[in-house]
Every structure is written in structure tokens, then in C-alpha cells.
Image: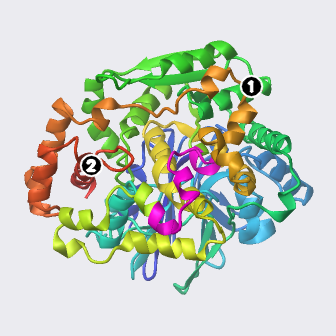
Amino acid sequence: MCGICGEIRMRGEPSISSSKAVTRAMHRRGPDAEGLFAQGSMAFGHRRLSILDLAAASQQPMIDSELGLGIVFNGCIYNFRELREQLSQRGYRFFSQGDTEVILKSYHAWGADCVTKFKGMFAFALWERDSGRVVLARDRLGIKPLYYIDHPDYFRFASDLPALLAGGDVDTSLDPVGLHHFFSFHAAVPPPRTILRGVRKLEPATILTLEPDGSRTTRRYWSFAVGARRDDRAMTEQEWTDAVTEAMLNAVDRRRVADVPVGVLLSGGLDSSLIVALLARLGHADVKTFAIGFDSIGEHRGDEFYYSDLVAKHFATAHEQIRIDGREALQHLPDAIQAMSEPMVSHDAVAFYLLSREVAKRVTVVQSGQGADEVFGGYSWYPSLLTANNASDQYREVYFDWKHSDIAKLLTPDLVADDYSSEFVENFFDRTSASSPVDKALQIDAEIMMVDDPVKRVDNMTMAHGLEARVPFLDHEVVELAARLPTSLKLGDGGKYILKKAARALLPAEVIDRPKGYFPVPALRHLQGEFLDYVRDTLSSSAARSRGLYRPEFINHMLDHPEAEMSPKGHSRLWQAALLEAWLQTHV
């Protein structure tokens, strides 16, 4: 787990000072070491968080002079030891003990298709000394980020969008399409776009190859299709349960590979509790677990300690409650915004930031439960699609934070044109192989929305403190299996039916049958007091006025009626507008 960057010049040599600036801007992602390599028209930088092979032999950028290859790599290949054994049998010799060198040897042995052999999360750039070719790749589910600038004079990439800006010469004007997606999709901007015209992001499961003559190709190397398979119709409910249990056991076990301690972020919900239970099933004692809680506001609780304590006691984990004063959440809100590669509106971003700050003092790697709702059908709006006549219309109704007509009221006219987000959903639903409306919704959520909302949020907030988060529900074999599940085994029993059934052999019933919870920060969900003052100050600042992003009359309306302006899912639309402006003031 690290930060990577690089620059390939179409003419001349890259600026070493620019490459250093981009590398150093990612110091929080890799606090343990810094490396820079430049040769000819290329320069590559790396920030290291030491987790596998702590020795200097695994420093990056890593150069294999014998093979004529170099690499910068962010992530973890969980099956690297098995691949190393296969490569050793083919005659390859190794000078390190980690997974980075395994990628180099795998590329030499199998070419760019080596990514199909990797079980893990990764983003890397690999270059060939003799040909000058550069290959970039991102993992199947987009767990590891990779942003880039495709400029006529250069191609620059990094793990972090603001780090790219540190290199200078970037078009930071706002992209109207990206903005429309930001407001519609709960701040998720589908790749390759971002809210900035000059910055793009590599799509998940994609290989991008840059040739020395400046030409480039992109290729998607993996996909999954949501929907029941004819060959699976004979499977019984118990067989599905056993298959899911086995797949999750493998996923959790894989994510234990490390040369440092591994803990679990235990919210007390089904997903994180199941991870703890599976670790116990695998025979791992003294698991370190962590839970966070904030002040309650009225009837809105700020913690779920009752359930996390229940799980911790049941499995005798080494458990810590981390209590955060609500005023501290406001105090560190600018720090959380500083840690965002892209603006993230979910109120639990600051919770993850503060939780990660404390957990990083205890361990370097944690497992977390993100992705289960999208993969196994846990969200409350999915059942409404079972009877939908028009999949895209119903999806917009239950998912969009802002309708196009409301976006037109909020943004200044030069930033509003077509209903880009509705068009995106319709096009996605038209081309997906999923047949039913609910399967189409599960496909877009798992393939697009999950990557640029919960997955990105956890990566950014944990890496802000040099903490690596691993997400077993996004093991690609788990995702492939879940995609085949009959709809009833997902949406039954209020959602995630099959996970609940699998969990009944492992967890106390009280944890499984509890009401669905969330990562609570009541002060951001229900804006009032100092948090409302922060929002008001942000939106009325001279920077906001000079930017001219919003129509003043609609901002004033939301400030006067903050509780009335909520999205269909209960999120503050006022907070979304303020968060975007705060992010722009911080980074652009």
C-alpha cells in the first residue's frame, strides 16, 4: 500500500522538480520511504508504506536490470507467494521477498495478461527499458485509485488527484458532466471523468498501454454480469449458503497476508461482524477490533457500541471503543477534506478519518466490510425495482440526490446543459447484459457507484494516516459468485438474505436481526449549530462568491431551510453543495 506517480514526456525530458512535488504530495500514503527514478523521457516516483518484505530490497521504484523492467506499484497481491513459486519453477530468480518483484516477473513471463492471475488490489505502472513502452493497470474492482492527465506534451499519473495538481500545468476548470454526476450520484463521478476537465481516472479492470510514439490503447481485462445462470438453477439454498461461506472464508484468509499486525474495523453491523466471525472460524485468536462513536443528537444515536461490544465479547477480540467528541469532528473536518482525492459527500468520511487516525497508532492493516450492500443487495431501495416498469426511471427516483431540474436551480447557467446523469444511466442499462431492473441496478452500483463512493472513501481516509484497508467483500471471486445469486437470495429478509443465512451458523442472532445501521455522524446528517455555521461560512466566503458556482438565491433558500433540503436517501443537499466548495477551496 503506497502512493505512485510518473510522467512520460512526448518531447524532451520530464521535470525532476515536478516529479518530486507530486511524489512528496503523497507522503501520507507512504510515510516510510520515498523513491524517484528518471531516465530519458520518463520519471517515476513512489511513497512506501511497508507491509510486505520490510527490507530495503523491496524499495520502489523497483528496477530489474536482468529483465529490463521497472515498476511503481500500489496495493497488495495476496497470492504472490503462489505465483512466486510458479515463476521459480520457470527459472526466475528473485532478489526480494515481497509482491512487487512478483509483478515484474509475471509481466515478463505472461505479458500484460498477468493481471488476470493476480488476486488482490493494485494500481501499477510498469515500463520496458528497451522498447520504452509503459503499461498501467488497475485492479478488477477499482479498490486502488489511479488518476492521470493526458496533456499534448506529457502523460502524468498518480494515486491521488491533488498530488497531480502539485506538478503544475493542469486544466482545473470544472467539467459540467462531472459536476452533474457529482450531484446526481451522491458525489460519485463515474470514470474516466472527474469534476476537473484536465484530470481523468483509469477505469477498474483496465490496462492502458503507452507506446514510445505517443499512441495508446486501453483494454478491459475482466467483467462480471449480474443475473442468475441457467446452470445454477439446480442449486439449493443450502448449496448457495455453503458456496458463499467458503468464498468469504477464502477472501478473509487471503487478506491476512502481511508482515505487520492486521485488525478489523468493527462497526457492529452484519458485514464487519461476519469478517470477525470468519477469522475466528479460521482459528485466529486475539483479533484486534476497533469501533468509533460520536455524540448523539436527540433520538439519533452517534454510536453502535452495543452491537460491536456484543461481537467483540462473543469472539473474545482485543477490542477498543474510540469515542470522538462531536466538536472534534468539526475541528478535523478540514483535515478530512484535505485527504479527499475527490470531493466525497457522505457524512461518515470524517468518521473514517478519525477512526483511521486512532487505529493507525495500533496496527498498519485492517479488514473492513465495504461493498457487501452493493454486491449482496443490502440497500433499502432495491426491492422497489422488482416491480419497476422502467428500470432507469425507477433507479433515478430512488438513487439520485438531485434531479436535473434541481441542479439547474443550484448551478449557474454556464455549468448546466443536458441531463447527463440520466443519459449515463440509460446508456449503462441498455448495454448491460442484466435483464431485470433490479439486476441492472445491482450491476451499476457494484461496477460504478461502489468504486467511487464507499471504496474510494475508505481508501482515502485510511491512507491519510498510512493505514491499509482490505475489503474481502470485493474479492473478485466473491463478486462473481454473488452476481450469479437468484434475486430472492439477495433481497429476501430485508436484504442480504444469503449473508444472513450464512452468518446464522457463526454470529449471535441479535447481530443478524438488528435494524440496519450506518456509520453515524449525526451532526453532519442534521446540520445545526457550529456545523451549520461552517457550511454558511464556506458558501458565503469571498472564494465561493468569486467562483460563481452556485445561484445565490438557491443557496440562501437552503441555508434558511437546511432540514427541508434532504435527498431521497436522507442526506443533506446543503452539505453536498458546501462540501464541494470546501474541497475546491482546499485543492484547486
Say which element carries label 1: loop
Residue 546: horizontal and vertical position, in percent?
Answer: 9, 61
Quadrant that contains the C terminus = bottom left
Residue under label 2, please give it: 579
Q: Amino acid at mark 1?
A: Leu
Say which element carries label 2: helix
Name the mark on residue 506. Answer: 1
Residue 272: horizontal and vertical position, in percent?
Answer: 60, 32
Q: Nearer the viewer, residue 316 or 151?
A: 316
Vertical arrangement, residue 69 with respect to residue 317, above or below = below
Give the mark nearest the N terminus, 1 or 2. 1
Residue at 38% from the left image edge and 24% from the top image edge? 302
For the residues labelled 1 and 2, the Cα–Cα distance comes to 40 Å
Q: Find out whether the residues at labels 1 and 2 contact each other: C-beta distance under 8 Å.
A: no
Q: Nearer the viewer, residue 366 or 23?
A: 366
Residue 258: horizontal and vertical position, in percent?
Answer: 68, 35
Left or right, residue 229 beside residue 443 = right
How many neighbours does mark 2 have within 10 angstroms: few (below 14), some (14-19), or many (20 or more)? Answer: many
Q: Nearer the viewer, residue 127 or 552?
A: 552
> Can residue 380 be found in the magenta stretch?
yes
Q: Which portion, as a residue range, is magenta?
A: 373-394
Residue at 13% from the left image edge and 64% from the top image edge? 548
Instruction: Tell me, yes or no, if residue 475 can be seen here.
Output: no
Instruction: Tell me, yes or no, if residue 585 can be seen here.
Output: yes
Q: How many marks?
A: 2
